[in-house]
Image (cartoon, coloured by chain):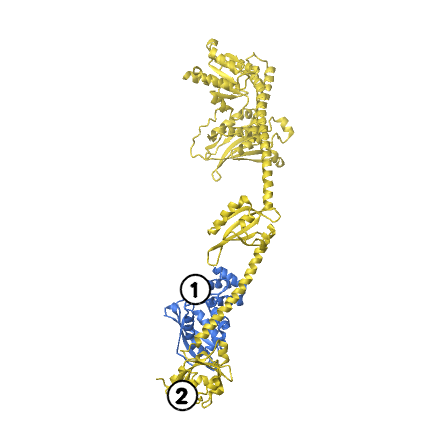
Amino acid sequence: MHGMINKSIEDLVTIKFGADKWIAVKKKAGVEVEAFISNESYPDQMTYGLVGAATEVLGLTVDQVLYAFGEFWVVHTASRGYGDLLKSAGRTLGEFLDYLPLFHTRVALIFPNLQPPRFECSDRHEDRITMHYYSHRPGLSMVVVGMLNGVAQIYNTPATVTQTKFKDKGADHDEFLVVWSAAVST
Amino acid sequence: MLNRGQFATLFPFHFVLDGNMRVVDCGSVLLRICPELIVGSNIADHFTLFRLGDAPAKLLSREWVLQQQATLFIFKSRSSELILRLQLVILDDPERFLFLGSPWVRNATELKSLQLVLRDFALHDSTGDLLQLVESTNTSLRDATQLATRLEVRNAELKQLIDSANAPILIIDSAGKVADWNKTTERLTGFRINEVIGKQFIDTFVVTESQDDVRRLLLDTFAGRSGGNMEFLMHTRDQRKLLAIFSASPKLSIDGSVAGTILVGQDITELGEYRTQLEKRVADRTEQLALANEELSRVMRSKDDFVSAMSHELRTPLNAILGLSESLAEGVYGNLNEKQVKSITTIAESGHHLLSLINDLLDIAKIGAGKMELEWLATNVDDACQASLRFVAELAAKRKLTLQLEIDAEAHTITVDQRRLKQMLVNLLANAVKFTPEGGTVTLSTKADMSSDVVAFSVRDTGIGIAPEDLHRLFSPFTQLDSKLSRQYAGTGLGLTLVLKLAELHGGSVLVESELGSGSCFTIKLPWKNYSSSNSDGDARGEGSPVEASAAAGELANSPLILVADDNEINMMTVGDYLVAHGFRLSQAGNGLDAINLVREQSPDLVLMDIQMPIMDGLQAIKHLRAESKYDDVPIIALTSRAMVGDRERCLEAGANEYLSKPVNLKQLLSVIHSQLDARRSK
């Protein structure tokens, strides 16, 4: 898993709940990494362990943690690391989402070991788009929901994200419908 | 061939110049960010050429441009930060020069300042890839810087922790040299870290006698094994010695290989000194204790000897008193008048009282010394109770008391020392009889408690009772609760003490319930060791039914010859007179050696052998006789006043057929003599 993901979990817990909670989460997950490097690859199990420990330490459900993490990742962590680059991916929420597949393709080129997820777009409209999410990592669809909402926030565009297909219910991939206010986005 | 639209999409930053270097065409994105690049304007008015000397002037020269087909053109905007990296394409039309390329941007900030987005670039353009790579790398660099800062902080914390630990901590490298040690080690040894780094640890700092052990410890850890704990002495700057106990563990390098040893210790110098002092004190104390033990053993032996001697000294004259009283009462020395009989009865009663006192004292002394050994036997409860009642039956009848026995059929058998059980019951019964006024009732009852596996023996009376405030003194030795009572009722004051001690020796207890004026109930609770069926081999009738003396002596000449060996003339006379009175012939010896000689000379039918005699004691004499086969079947009855644990066994082991303790009950002696003679005859 991309180190930035673990780093984002750390930031989320530290900023929103306190440094002592992060120490507790790491201890509970049995993670001894002093600090994560964003573009290093870490075992997926470590990330799942951190999420699981966070649910116990913070008293949240897994979905709550995953959603919060996805949103936080975009709004804080990625914006800090890739802030201008993210914004340069498009002038509007729609443009950004349309650019998202290319962004992940480049990640896969730059970091061949990371195995990032693949996105596809379809049904592009002025106020909506359908995002298709393909990943070999199970159980992370709520992260995507949080991320998409986070992207809407950094573009100051109120949006609703609805998952329309579920891989864990038998679909071949997860699918999300993002609808926003065209007046704001354009 | 590309149409114009396709070309514009693929090359959004292109422009075309004519032979005079004037703009003929321009890509849409380029025109958006550089709107002054209008058709017909001279390119040199908008851009300069980077790193091409006086190129701006030359750029006007068509001939020069034609020669630069292999050159990367870097156009710098005169009005903004825009830099274009372009490649010249010579078209078929010699008056047209096509420049293809895109802006040079090194990061997203520059991209933003040029009002560009990634979508402005053609997909084949690697600018987007480059920017993402750069941003990723920058992010990693920031993370690494942050990590380095964190590690520095952590390192400082760790160093502070190690230095503030009140324990010597050392790192020895794989060459056995000191690589580091903490402030505590500096303080304890007096050597500063800068003085010791690089010095051989063992040779420089470890005392000679510990060097081999420490070398093995380091080798173990170099081999990746945890070396465990080791105590050794280190040199200090001021020539003292530091005694510390160290635990050793391998120090791993970043690639996982062993780079040295970490020693974490504890200063036990003071502890060592204290230990030495303590060992000396322990040794001194042990020596003192050994001496004290020896003295105690000597005192204990003296006490035993004293008790034994006192027993002997008291019983010997008592033997004479009781024996002669008995003989006198039976008219062995002629008929007595009524007054004489009354006097001799009083003498006998007093003697018996004294004997009880001695016996009780001896028993208590034995229990106190842990020398009383119980003979555990499955005992018939009913028989034991009946026998105990018989002991007090005569006295109860005299006092017109009713004796009752209530047996719980469940408690048929109990495993106890039956003699001691009867001793306890007789004590309680005698007390009850003694303290119950005429016409009263004394009841002995048993009760089985299946749940706690206990049998309770209760002696209940309708006597004078005991005040509650006196109950706690009841089991103290020599206690009779009212001094008037001690005059009114005979007793040693040891009975209840003995009962309690015997019960406890059985693992049991004694309870008392009493009401002043209404009577008392004493209950002995003994562990049952339950037997499902009666397998009692106890003889509960033996003591309560002494064999009657036989006065039927035969003709003197044919009567059995008894050799009495005793150094005490009174005893000799007492027993001798009694035996002669009952028709035996008598032979007498004053010591063991005389006894052997007389046996050889006279071949007596039975020998009564006192044990404590001068010249040769009874045990030696018995052994000598038994060594001669012709005297194998001569019954020998051992008599001793010692009555100590093991006496009986020693006598029987030496070869005696029977053992009796002085003072001897003469009727009992007579019974034993008869049974031994009968047994010999029946062989």
Residue under pointer 2: B96
Task: Using the image as rendered, state which of residue B400 and residue A9 is in the foreground.
Answer: A9
Task: Identify the mark at residue B603; answer none if there is no mark.
Answer: none
Q: Position of residue B568 (x, y in %)?
A: 56, 16
- Residue B102 falls in image quadrant: bottom left
Q: Colour of chain A?
A: blue
Q: Residues within 10 Å of mark 1 (few under 14, many from 20)?
A: few
Q: Which chain is yellow?
A: B
Total tally of numbered discs in the picture: 2
The chain letter for the residue carrying disc 1 is A
> In this rendering, do the residues under marks 1 and 2 share a single chain?
no
- Residue A171 falls in image quadrant: bottom left
Q: Position of residue B393 (x, y in %)?
A: 53, 25
Name above or below for residue B621 compared with residue B216.
above
Residue mark closest to the camera, 1 vs 2: 2
Task: Using the image as rendered, state which of residue B177 and residue A80 is in the foreground.
Answer: B177
Quadrant location, the N terminus of chain B:
bottom left
Residue under pointer 1: A44
Name above or below for residue A175 compared with residue B445.
below
Q: CA distance from mark 1 to mark 2?
A: 57 Å
Q: Position of residue B188 (x, y in %)?
A: 60, 50
Name above or below for residue B482 compared with residue A96.
above
Q: Amino acid at mark 2?
A: Arg
Q: Residue furthest right?
A: B484
Q: Amino acid at mark 1?
A: Asp
